Image (cartoon, coloured by chain):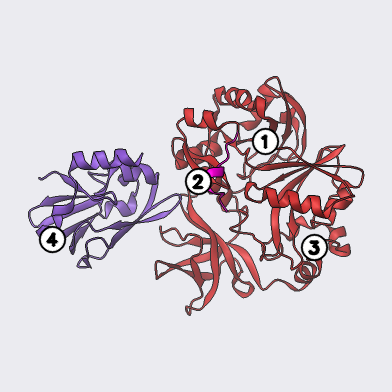
Amino acid sequence: MNAPAETVLRTPLHALHVALGARMVPFAGYEMPVQYEGIIAEHLHTRAHAGLFDVSHMGQVALTGSGAAAALESLVPGDIDGLKPGRTRYTMFTNAPGGILDDLMVTNAGDRLLLIVNAACKADDIAHLTGRLKGRCTVEPAPNRALLALQGPEAAGVMARLAPGAERLGFMSAGAFAVGGARGWIGRSGYTGEDGFEISVEDRDAERVTRLLLEQPEVKPIGLGARDSLRLEAGLCLYGHDIDTITTPIEADLAWTIGKRRREAGGFPGDAVILRQLRDGAPRKRVGILPEGRAPAREQTEITDANGRRIGTVTSGGYGPTLGGPLAMGYVEASHAKVGTPINLMVRGTPRPGRIVALPFVPHRYKKS
Amino acid sequence: MSELRYTNEHEWIRIDGDTAVIGISDYAQEQLGDVVFVELPEIGKKVEKGKEAAVVESVKAASEVYAPVSGEVVAVNDALTKDPALVNRSPTGDGWFLKLRLKDQGELAGLMDEAAYRKFVKGLK
């Protein structure tokens, strides 16, 4: 999914990442920091203090017009019409067979809906929105906005100092706040399982706001490597790996994102398949997997039952620094999805024992509202 | 004890009589980042020059460690099982992977010395 080398994009913070000593890698068409001092140290710092992530590669899109919520509901199974001003919801663009085109955050910003979509999908998402919602609302991509994520138990204290009032936001709420003299749109959400904030500012303010955040004693810059290990411990899906165009929200154990009204009325792509699976169950299910030994089971690792029959595949796997050992997420046949079920992971041709466990691996510590 | 020789896959080898100690270079450990798991071969296993002898895993990915020369595994560094980060802290010392009984001293000929390897790594940056 990476764009060809000649079109490698940079976020407004590229020079700062390099100056901070980041190792830069291609990701979703961008050159992004994978680590600064080291993935384990950055991961543990985020869980103990506050980590700052540049996620400006993600797509920010506004939908305007009185019909925006109803229009968006024709593309996602989430309840957007019932989303109150200042509130954020996680949902996904689905396709006709019930698969997932992308997952996204939708915020009701009063006069508009603000969407945050994945970097690798953003061009397709914008084309999808523009094509499908023509005449019903206006689709306004915001390519000149940066996005920062400040995550960790000390993030709220930092925000109270730099963006007074933002620390009082509830989980999955958002609003406009001044941050370091810049106009920011700040939400209380993230991708680490920790309390935290996502801060959208204009490109021209991005470096100044980032430097200000990094000056705070609690804050360190965190790369994409730790972002991945943090979200995996938190049991959160990575698009293109744990969810994709041939995986339904029900298989992905994301039924909780589909509200009562949408379950009854449908009216989104793939509703027949998704609502049937909601009623009758899906043939396979996303689960947490704890390998027994120390060997990580990586993405694409085959999962077998006690008799050696293949029952599924790992979709994300690695090492959890907070867990202190290997961990994985994957899909198994529904009959093997129960917590506690023993399984085998075929690591380099050798079956290694593991078992199905409940997600998340590390408890979420979101702000209680 | 003799000096280290290197492969262009970033393994090092140190000859001690008819046995050779093998590990990965400081450059390799730095590129990998935090090492979280090492898979070592069975004692007695015969490995071939250029073929997989061990596996080293960082937080992000698994990588093969290739045998710089052919031989029979006579020892493995069990300390890496409990403390894989030894590879990061001491890549050419306590973080060694395995010892081989050499099959053919002649295979050592194509390996780089410290100066040549340093130049080789410089070219990669």
Image quadrant in which the N terminus of chain A is located: bottom right
On the image, the x and y values in percent for residue A111 come to 87, 37
Q: CA distance from mark 1 to mark 4?
A: 58 Å
Q: Which secondary structure type mostly characterizes the magenta part of the structure?
A: loop
Which mark, residue A344?
none
Residues indicated by labels 1 and 4 sit on the same polypeptide chain: no
Location of mark 4 (residue):
B102
Callout 4 secondary element: strand
Location of mark 2 (residue):
A322
Q: CA distance from mark 4 to mark 2?
A: 41 Å
Callout 2 secondary element: loop
Callout 3 secondary element: loop
Q: CA distance from mark 2 to mark 1?
A: 21 Å
- Could you say which is closer to the camera, residue A293 or residue A110? A110
- In contact (CB < 8 Å): disc 2 and disc 1: no
Location of mark 3 (residue):
A269
In the figure, what tint was chain A given? red
Question: Is B73 on the left or on the right of A271, as rendered?
Answer: left
Question: Is A336 on the left or on the right of B34, as rendered?
Answer: right
Residue at the image point whose x is 58% and y is 58% from the top = A241
Judged from this view, the residue extending furthest toward the right is A66
**Residue stretch in magenta:** A1-11
- Could you say which is closer to the camera, residue A135 or residue B70? A135
